[in-house]
Image (tube, grey):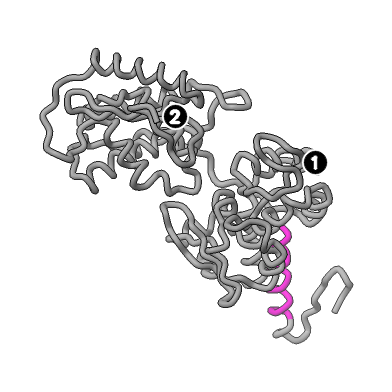
Amino acid sequence: MPKGLYRRENSPFWWFKFEYRGHRFRGSTEKTSIGEAQTVLAAERAKAANQVKVVVKRDGELVTFGDASSAYFDEVGQHHVGAKHTSWSLNWLQREIGAHTRLDAIDGKTVMRLVSKRRGESARLGGKLSHSTVNRSMTEPLRKVLLHAAKVHGAEVAKIDWKKYMLKEPAERVRELKEEEEAALFEHCREDYAPIIRFALLTGCRQSECVGLTWADVDFGNRHIVIRGKGDTVVPIPMPAAVREVLWPLRGNHKTAVFTYTAQRKRDGRKAKQHYPITINGLSTAWRRLKAKADLQDYRFHDHRHTAATRVLRAGGNLGVVKKLLRHARIETTMRYSHVNHDDVEAAMQAAADRSAAKKPGLRVVSDKGVA
C-alpha cells in the first residue's frame, strides 16, 4: 500500500494520512483510483507546507481540527449506522475549515460562515437544502467534534452558543398512513422491500434503525429486538407475534443483515437473485419509486414512525407505552408523534356523551342509528 494512503471501512475512497512539523493531516481523497489518490496526497502535502504554522502542543493533545475530526470518526462516527453520512459531513467540514486550523480558533463567526455556505449549496435532487439538512449535515457534526475533543481529550475549544446557529425547523407534521393508502402501498411494493416497510410500520423504528438491524439484535427466544438508535443508544423493544411473522421468514437470507434485497441482475460484483443488505440509499430510491406507483402524496418514510405511534396510542390509550416504544427521553417529545385525528376526537366526544346520558334517566341518546 502506498505510503500516506490507506483504505477505511464504510468508505469507497482512498484516505491520506501524514505528519508535517508535528501536525497530523488526515482526510479523504474522494478518489477511488490509486493514481488519482496519489495526486491528491501530493497536493495536500504541498498545501500543508504552505499553510501550517508551528504550534506548541503536548503529546497526544488535539490541537487542530484535522486531529479532532479524525479522532471523532475513529472513536465514534465510524460506529454510526449512517457512518457514510458522518464521513461526508466531516470531510466537508475539514475542507471548509482546514485540517490545520486550531480548535480554539473555531468560534461563532466560523459557525455562522459555515451555515451560510451550506445553505447556499443545492440539494441532490435540485432546489435549496432544508434547514434540517443544514443542521444535521453541518452544524450538529461540528458541535459533536468540538465537544468530543473537549470532553474526551481535554482540548481547548471556544465557547459557542450552538442554539444561536441552529436553523429553525418546521413543527412536526401530522401525517398518518390511511388504510386505503397502506393497501395501495403493499400492492405496488417489491416483495423484497415489503418486510422492512412492514417492520417500520409495526415498530416505529427510524429508517437507519431498520437498515442497521442485524440478526445479533434479534432474540426470538426472549421475544425482543435490540434497536441501536440516535446518540448511540441501545434499547430493547418487544417482539409481538406480528413482528415475528415479518422477521421469521427472513432467516437465512443473509449472515448478518436482517433486511435484504434480491439483486435483479448481475452488476458491480453482485450476482443475480442473490440477497444483499439493504442500504440507506437503496431504500430511499426504492421508497421514492414506490410512492410514485402507489400515488402516495405528502408521506415520508419517517411518517411510518408517526403512524406506528398513533396506532399504538389509539389501541391502548396509554401515552407512556408509546414513549417507551419510540424510546423517547421526554414525554413532550412523544406527544408530537402520537397525534389524534378528527375522527378520534369525534368518537371520544360521543363516547363521553353516551356515558353521561346513560347515568341520567329520561335523557335520550341520539346516534347515527337513531334514538336509543
Q: Does the stretch in magenta take in 213? A: no
- Binning the other alpha carbons within 10 Å of mark 1 as few (below 14), some (14 to 19) or many (20 upward) gives few
Query: Could you say whether the residue bearing mark 1 is in a helix, strand or loop?
Result: loop
Q: Residue 14 carries which label?
A: 2
Q: Quadrant of the C terminus?
A: bottom right
Which residue ends up furthest to the front in the rendered image?
1
Q: Does the stretch in magenta take in 353? A: yes
- Asked if residue 128 lies left or right of residue 355, the reply is left
Give above or below for 42 relative to 324.
Answer: above
Residue range of the region highlighted in magenta in the rendering: 342-357
Q: In this view of the protein, which residue sits in the foreground, 351 or 175?
A: 175
- Asked if residue 109 lies left or right of residue 93, the reply is left
Amino acid bearing label 2 = Trp
- Asked if residue 282 lies left or right of residue 92, the reply is right
Q: Which mark is residue 74?
A: none
- Binning the other alpha carbons within 10 Å of mark 2 as few (below 14), some (14 to 19) or many (20 upward) gives many
Picture coordinates of residue 172, whole percent (x, y): 56, 47
Amino acid bearing label 1 = Asp
Picture coordinates of residue 181, whole percent (x, y): 79, 51
Q: In this view of the protein, which residue sits in the foreground, 134 or 272?
A: 272
Q: How far apart are marks 2 and 1 (CA)?
A: 41 Å
Residue at coordinates 28% horizontally, 44% vertically from top-left?
A: 148
Give above or below for 276 relative to 18.
Answer: below
Give above or below for 161 relative to 113.
Answer: below
Residue at coordinates 57% horizontally, 52% vertically from top-left?
A: 206
Question: Which residue is denoted by mark 1 in the rendering?
Answer: 295
- Asked if residue 214 lies left or right of residue 88, the reply is right
